[in-house]
Amino acid sequence: MFSSQSLGGTSRPGRILGPSLDKIIKNVAWRKHSQLVSACKSAIDRLETLKDSSDPIPNSPILGFAPVDAESVLLPLIIAIDSASVKVVEPALECVLKLFSQGLIHGEIDRQEGNDSPSVTARLIDSICKCGGLGDDGIELSVLKVLFCAVRSPFVLLRADYLVQIVKTCYNVYLGSLSATNQICAKAVLAQILLIIFARVEEDSMEVMVHTVSVSELLELSDKNLNDSNLIQFAQNFINEIIEGSEVVSDLKAFPSAQLELRNGDDSGSAEEGNCKLGDGELNDEAESNGGSKIREDGFHLFKNLCKFSMKFSAQENPEDHLLLRGKILSLELLKIVMEHGGPTFWRTNERFLNALKQYLCLSLLKNSALSVMSIFQLLCSIFMSMLLKFRSGLKAEIGIFFPMLVLRVLENVLQPSFLQKMTVLNLLEKISHDSQVIIDIFVNYDCDVDAPNIFERTVNGLLKTALGPPPGSTTTLSQAQDIAFRLESVKCLAGIIKSMGVWMDQQLRVTDFYPLKGPENDASIESINILGEEGAAVDYELLSESSSELSKAATLEQRRAYKIEFQKGISLFNRKPSKGIEFLINANKIGGSPEDVASFLKNTSGLNETMIGDYLGEREEFSLKVMHAYVDSFNFEAMDFGEAIRFFLRGFRLPGEAQKIDRIMEKFAERYCKCNPTSFSRADTAYVLAYSVIMLNTDAHNSMVKDKMSKADFIRNNRGIDDGKDLPEEYLGALYDQIVKNEIKMNADSSAPQSKQANSFNKLLGLDGILNLVTGNKTEEKPLGANGALIRHIQEQFRAKTGKSESVYYAVTDTAILRFMVEVCWAPMLAAFSVTLDQSDDKVATSQCLQGFRHAVHVTAVMGMQTQRDAFVTSVAKFTYLHCAADMKQKNVDAVKAIMSIAIEDGNYLQEAWEHILTCLSRFEHLQLLGEGAPPDASFFTVPQSETEEKTQKPIGFPHLKRKGSSMQNPAVMAVVRGGSYDSATLGVNTSGLVSAEQISNFISNLNLLDQIGNFELNHIFAHSQRLNSEAIVAFVKALCKVSMAELQSPSDPRVFSLTKIVEIAHYNMNRIRLVWSRIWNVLSDFFVSVGLSENLSVAIFVMDSLRQLAMKFLEREELANYNFQNEFLRPFVIVMQKSSSAEIRELIVRCISQMVLIRVNNVKSGWKSVFMVFTTAAADERKNIVLLAFETMEKIVRDYFPYITETETTTFTDCVRCLITFTSSRFNSDVSLNAIAFLRFCAVKLADGGLVCYEKTKESDTSIPVVDEDASDGHPFTDKDDQVYFWVPLLTGLSKLTSDPRPAIRKSSLEVLFNILKDHGHIFSRSFWMGVYKSIIFPIFSSFQDKIETQSMNDDQSSPNSRFQQPRMGSMWTSETSTVAAQCLVDLFVSFFDVVRSQLPSVVSVFMGFITNPYLNRSIGVAALLRLAGDLGHRLSENEWKEIFMALTEVAASTLPGFWKVLGTMDNIEVPDVSQSYRDRDEFFYDQGSTTDDFEDDSLQTAAYVVSRIKGHIAMLLLVIQVINDLYKVHQQYLSTANIMILLEMFSSIASHANELSSKTALQVKLQRACSILEIPDPPVVHFENESYQNYLNFLRTLLMDKPSLCEEMNVEAKLVAVCEKILQIYLNCAGCLTEQKCNQPVLHWILPLGSAKKEELAARTSFVVLALRVLSGLERNSFRRYVAHFFPLLVDLVRCEHSSGEVQRVVSDIFQLNIGPIIMDL
């Protein structure tokens, strides 16, 4: 024997092999194993001579040894392992373990085809695997160790066959070992081996980091009988020791070439994949062997074999093979491990491995899904979970099959589910729900695909059904505990789904920063993921489905979803009314309009009701018949047996029950069958009759209601002679009979278990009806699956057909818009599930999940802007707070209150209108808190003095003392709350008549204690958090709070102020927001304060106004820059309420509030002055004297003490101040107020003139601006600094101007004086253009009312009856003579003072005075005096043209009245005024009805005559005044008058005199007027006096002119005019006396003359003076002039001598003329 110290030599392998071989020699039986002993000794001897080689030796299995030496030393180990002796095998395995663990065995271990002598390492592995069947526990563990080390060694590349052999060996240990420890270790080793192998496949490298498998996790689903902690710990240590003990001594870098051999080498034929038979229907992978790396080739081969292991089924003779079932479970467990640890790179992108998943793993899932073993189902679910989470992009079609089969089928079974099975599905869905991307991808790729099932929708609806539990009255196998568990898990899943949707949404919005991703790859927010192959080639899938021409045009998934929804709507309509459904789909362009298109739709579309299809095909309408023909023609029955053909034909629809419909369908079927098989029957009638017979036979044989079954002979006999009179062969009919009897003809859907219609339709689409029948039926044995290989092949054909089609395209979206469609699908089920669970369950976990679901649902719907859904969720949570029915409150309701508060904090930016529900809850919560604390009702706040209101609102809402259970709980407010009410009721406890028991009060008190979980901090935090809301959210928040506050305050029984105080708070919190946002907030608050301020409840209105005052005081603390309007907007509610409120108390409160604010914050008031003055303006016109006086008191202080602040930054407020003062001037309560207001206006003018405005910025408002540029203005220079102030004079001066029309004389006089004093005192600072505007818009309007009335009356003379004109009120009655005098004097003074600037306004000023003269209702002397004074002060300064303008104005006045005057006189033409003595009866026939309103014609005519008399008198007085003015102006200013102006005067005298003569000549008119005056007892019109005065003044003017300006008179021929006037006067006189010669020339000679009557004598007496004057003027002519003109008037002198005179003076003057003038002329002849 060799010494153990030197055995094996000095080499590293020798130091391991020597002692082991020596131990084998010692343990072996020499006689029995002599060959082994010899080999061991020979090997030891050789080892003594071998040394480690410094250079790597290629193809050597042992590091440092030559191949021959290596084989010689390993051969004894192989022989020892093959010896089957435990004592020999054990040291051999230990030696091999050390060689592998220390990395001494190198190389590739493969089984070469055609090579009968495998390598020594291959034989070694074979031997190790074989010895695993010895049955010894220790040997089994050693084998496991050796194989594990071999696989783990990075220097040994085990190829596919040996990997499979190793796995099988471990399988056998697991299945065959009698030791539980060995079984667990074998399972752990298998799992660890697979982790190593597939980690290398992922990295394509031998060097990988692999985590250690957890033994306890391996026993979760199966082998629970082995689940012993000691065994598990042993197995875990077993794995850990192998991994930790496998230390590689040699450096890998020292042997790069050897390492290189083991990696990435090409293998073209190492795996015999082409010859690998998987059984019926399995696919061949031969075409996929594409020469990839060896590591990946081996991994692929092993994966395929694992799938094969999982698909082994028991034989028919031994259906319950538990060992095989255990092996199947192990295979599935290993597949689960592989799938769970599949790498993220290679597995998801390698086309070959994806195809392997589709072909092998999916096939395994299909086959195993038929088993009813729970552990297998759980493993299938786990594997499917991994497929879904990791490989869904490449397995879209497959997932679309397995999800309904594994998940939805179980989920939708509500009545008779397996508890463990359904819990497994629910746990699976819970895991899925935690992956947000999976949830989104499921919806996008299935629910938005027309050809895919609605997985997301069905999942949500299934969870809803589970959450609601079995329907009432239904029979179920579930216990109550199981049902509760189902409900809880389903609610968890729903909550997880909506949470994941929110998480995904938040991620997308955060990534995109609320903007869509930009880039060409994301234009439509859809990405098509191309699956990259091993060679880097992409599988080019079409983006959209090929099955629909319209769908191919869709550009977005949203359109695809919308298309699918509409398409399903058409299907649903078809299932109710087929014709309507077809019409809808055709009109919506979802199917074509041709019969062929409709037939294709009926044949290929899933979800259609087969009965309805049959009914539609059997219709007799033309289009339906064409569709039926096209449907039947679409089948190809060529080479089909008749029975097979009819079975194939009837699988897609159910024959209708009506015989005629069946007849039409079968007739067409027979025709089609004979066309496809021309030689089958002689005529189509044969096929038609036989088809009917087959249908009858099928019904007879398979209908349980038929007792007497048809025999084969009967069937043959019934079909005799149907083939054109001949019989069909009996063998043929017999075979057909047997076929129908043994296998019923039925539709595809008939083979599946009863499920929902939707599930059936999708199962039909996926071809899973047979599989589901096996799974859902009562069959637990595996036997039927083996007999149904055709079905497996059919499904695999479907997999292959779907490859590369639209449903295999995987879509990934980044646009959150897809969530809208998801929410539309799931919101209603989620709302129902959460609501019902929350209502019915008191389980804390369930209610917590429901509330979490509500929170996440609100988050998603709110952020997505889905108002209806958001409000539904928020309303539901709000109702579940039970704050409206506090006596019934529980802990879950308190949790709902917390949820409401969390929603408010987390999603406040998106709640919008839903804020109302949240704030309503907060209001009710606060109410309950106050009641519990014994606080007084809010109504008590309304009685608090105003000075204390602000301090009250600053206090906390709650009170510090504890709950009071005594009498405080018996107040009416508490009773109302205990009674409760509906959620929507505005006031709690509406049913006030209900009684409240002591128990209810006790419950209420205990529930109030529950509310202590929520403190005031949480409540107030929501309002404080409003500062963080965005600009849109804060506006919505304020709107909702105002609405809630409105409801609180309008409560008729218990108005509350909680929300009102919070409004004040949030206004404080948000006052520092940017101006634009704050403006929007205040618009809402402003409307609220106005609305509540106008409330009929006085206490509420007062409280609100005081709250507004608090806000205003706070707001006025902020500085405001110039030209902003925020303060004005802020104070506007005061203005509106002041203007609209009918309550004197409110108006007085507003005045006091404004006064207080202004006096305290006067330094900060800027634009707010406008609102302040508007309030005071409204107060000035108030009906209450105290309000007026209070407001004026403040105004007085403002103007006196704070005038500079008014216009500090906003100059337009000066005009508001002026308007306010002007309004005070109209106060009817106290004249002192009005006079003081006028005085303040004077004060304002002084300040304005002195530069009292801080800002001189021009502000022109449309309602106050006036034209300030006159066309005649000669200076066009720009305004100076002082001129900038003129724009502020306008409202002040205009206001004073309007005050001049005040009905109170004192106010009129004072305003006139102040106005003209202001203009006179400060007019020097006005520019000429502004002066023009002052006259036109301020001064002249004072007098314009009178002129306008005169003009209006003149224009309407022809339209108004004399009676109506006579009854008009006296114009100018508001102006007294004193006021008119003052106004005229002020105008003259002002005009004279600034004549140089305003002289262009002379015509207008004169026209004002003319208005006085022409106005019959004013003192005309005022106008005369003003005009004379104006001329007197300006006479020497007036130019010739200006004098002309004055005279032309007088001329115009005289002329303008003539047309109207003559028109008035014309009204007397048709009126006959009777003599005084004539009877009224005789006079009635002369009256003409003038349209008067009275029936008394006499009175009407007399009134008309009286009016005419009045007009004549006024007209004469006016013309006489004009004559007087002319005379006075000439006398004083003749030296300034030019010839032209004098000519104007002459024309005026002449025209007036002519007019007077014309009026006097109308004797008939005078007679009528005299009679009327006699009757009316009024003086006659002074017509004679008017004529006398006019001629007399004309004559005097001519004589004066002749005397003063003889030279001018010669030029103007004044002397001739003088003689003509005298001559006219003499004619008038003689005509009156009746002695005019012209009157007698044609008359017979009179021998005597009657004396004149008294009337004539009086007239002659009146005319005596002006005749005497005329005679004296004639006598005063020079002799030559007299001689020249005597011939004209001598006959008149003669007539004077002859006529009668009333005075002897005329005769004396005539005598003098004859003596002194005519006599000398005669003497000179």
Image (tube, grey):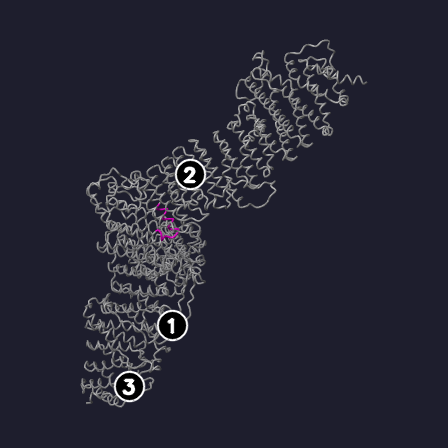
Label 3 sits on residue: 71
Name the one closer to the observer, 1127 or 545: 1127
* Overall secondary structure of the magenta section: helix
Of all residues, the one furthest to the right in this rendering is 1725
Which amino acid, mark 3?
Answer: Glu
First to last magenta residue range: 1026-1041
Q: Secondary structure at mark 1?
A: helix
Label 1 sits on residue: 288
State the image coordinates of residue 1490 (x, y, percent, origin top left): 57, 21
Q: Secondary structure at mark 3?
A: helix
Name the one closer to the observer, 1013 or 1656: 1656
Q: Is residue 1173 visible?
A: no
State the image coordinates of residue 410 (x, y, percent, origin top left): 28, 58
Of discs 1 and 2, which sits in the foreground?
2
Label 2 sits on residue: 1195
Above or below, comparing residue 1275 to residue 1142 in the picture: below
Name the one closer to the observer, 1142 or 89: 1142
Task: Choose top left, top right, bottom left or bottom right for residue 1535.
Answer: top right
